[in-house]
Image (cartoon, grey):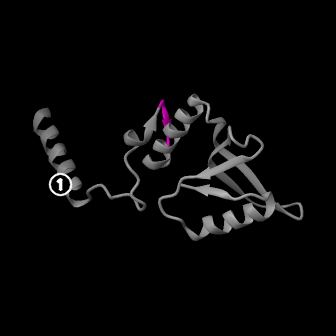
Amino acid sequence: MSKQERMSVEASRCLSAMKRNPRRKNKYGVAPKAERTYNKIVFASKKEMLRFIDLERLQKAGEIFGLKRQVRFPLEVNEQKVCDYVCDFVYCSRTDPHIMIVEDVKGKILPSFRIKEKLFHALKGFKIKIT
């Protein structure tokens, strides 16, 4: 068997394997990596990426300041760490600069998020803005 024949046999095996096992759709319908990448930052979702672009524009316009991504908040009760909450964005508004806005972009709100949201509010004293 020649080299070309072996390659064509391997190619046909790959094609038949692809037909049997096509790419599965993501459980939560997340877009491909290329569609949710902006300025070499890969976001968890396309919606989160678009919100970041909006927040960047607001920051450039001077409406908000101190924009940060993926800020980790340890949630502790009686000096015992329960879990960490990692929000999508944290920033301050120009109209009320003393209040930090914690924002999370959600397509689907899961029960585990609701628990962390309530715990965060109880421990930190402010609510999470869900977009």
Instruction: Pick whichever, 23 or 11, lies toward us.
Output: 23
Residue 106, visible in the rendered structure: yes
The secondary structure making up most of the magenta span is: loop
Specify whether residue 48 is painted magenta.
no
When the figure is inspected, residue 61 is found, relative to residue 28, above or below; the finding is: above
Q: Position of residue 128 (x, y in %)?
A: 66, 57
Query: Circle 1 is placed at which residue position?
Result: 16
Give the SS element for disc 1. helix
Q: Position of residue 65 (x, y in %)?
A: 66, 34
Position of 37 with respect to 19 (left or right) is right
Which residue is at a point 75% across and 46% down the rendered structure image?
Answer: 99
Q: Residues within 10 Å of mark 1 (few under 14, many from 20)?
A: few
Which residue is at a point 16% across and 38% down the rendered structure image?
Answer: 7
Instruction: Pick whichever, 96 or 121, lies toward us.
Output: 96
Work out which quarter of the rendered image holds the N terminus and state it: top left
When the figure is inspected, residue 129 is found, relative to residue 100, above or below; the finding is: below
Q: Quadrant of residue 16?
A: bottom left
When the figure is inspected, residue 11 is found, relative to residue 60, above or below; the finding is: below
Position of 29 with respect to 120 (left or right) is left
Q: Residue furthest right?
A: 78
Q: Residue furthest front?
A: 95
Which residue is at a point 42% across and 42% down the rendered structure image?
Answer: 36
State the extent of the magenta-drawn residues as a range. 39-43
Instruction: Pick whichever, 89 or 19, lies toward us.
Output: 89
Position of 110 with respect to 65 (left or right) is left
**Amino acid beneath label 1:** Ser
When the figure is inspected, residue 2 is found, relative to residue 109, above or below; the finding is: above
Numbered label tally:
1
Q: Position of residue 111 (x, y in %)?
A: 58, 71
Residue 2, visible in the rendered structure: no
Position of 30 with respect to 78 (left or right) is left
Q: Quadrant of residue 119?
A: bottom right
